[in-house]
Image: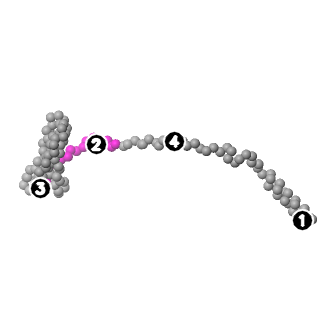
Amino acid sequence: MKVNKLFLAALVATAAVALTGCVVTGTVHEHYREPRAVYVAPPPPGPVYVAPAPAYAAPAPSVIVVQSAPPPVIVERRPPHPGGSVIWVDGYYEPRGRDWVWISGHYAAPPRAGAVWVPPRYERRGSEVHFSVGIWR
C-alpha cells in the first residue's frame, strides 16, 4: 500500500504543478484582425539626366580630302512634293573612311526663310579628291 500512496502522492503533485500554469480564457484568435489591403503608389520616376550641350562644338570639316573619286552618281526618281516649304536635295556620295556612302535624295526644310541649299561637290586636285560638304546659305 505504501507504493500506491507514494504513487498517488506523486500523481497529485504532478497534476497540481501542471494545472497551476496560465489560464487561457476565450479563443486564441479573439483579438486578431485580418489586415486591410492598402494601395501604396510606386514612387515617382527619378530625375532624367540630360547632358548639357558643350559650350563649343567644333564644326565638321567643310572639305574632306580623299584618295579616290566617288562612283558614278545614282539616278533617283524624285517623289511628288509633299507640300510646304521643303526643297528637294539631290542624292550624293559622301566619303566615310576609305569608302563612299550614297546619301539618298530627300526633301529638306530650309533652316530659315530665304536659305538656299548649296549641294556638295567633288574637285580633283592631282591624285586627291576634295569633297566639299553641302550647306545651307
In the drawing, what numbered circle is on residue 54? 2
Which of disc 4 and disc 2 is earlier in sequence?
4
How far apart, in angstroms, are the residues tagged by discs 2 and 4? 44 Å
Amino acid type shown at disc 4: Tyr
Amino acid type shown at disc 1: Val
Please give the range of residues in magenta.
50-66
Name the residue beneath numbered marker 4: 39
Name the residue beneath numbered marker 1: 3
The question of residue 21 being in magenta is answered with: no
Which of disc 1 and disc 4 is earlier in sequence?
1
Question: Can you say whether 27 is above or below 83 in the image?
Answer: below
In the drawing, what numbered circle is on residue 71? 3
Amino acid type shown at disc 3: Pro
How far apart, in angstroms, are the residues tagged by discs 1 and 3? 121 Å
> Which of the image's four quarters has the N terminus?
bottom right
**Residue at (82, 56) in percent of width and height:** 15
Q: Can you see residue 110?
A: no
Residue 135 pos. (x, y %): 15, 42
Q: Residues within 10 Å of mark 3 (few under 14, many from 20)?
A: few
Report the mark closest to the observer, 4 or 1.
Answer: 4
Q: Main secondary structure of the magenta part?
A: loop
Report the mark closest to the observer, 2 or 1.
Answer: 1
How far apart, in angstroms, are the residues tagged by discs 3 and 2? 37 Å
Report the mark closest to the observer, 3 or 2.
Answer: 3
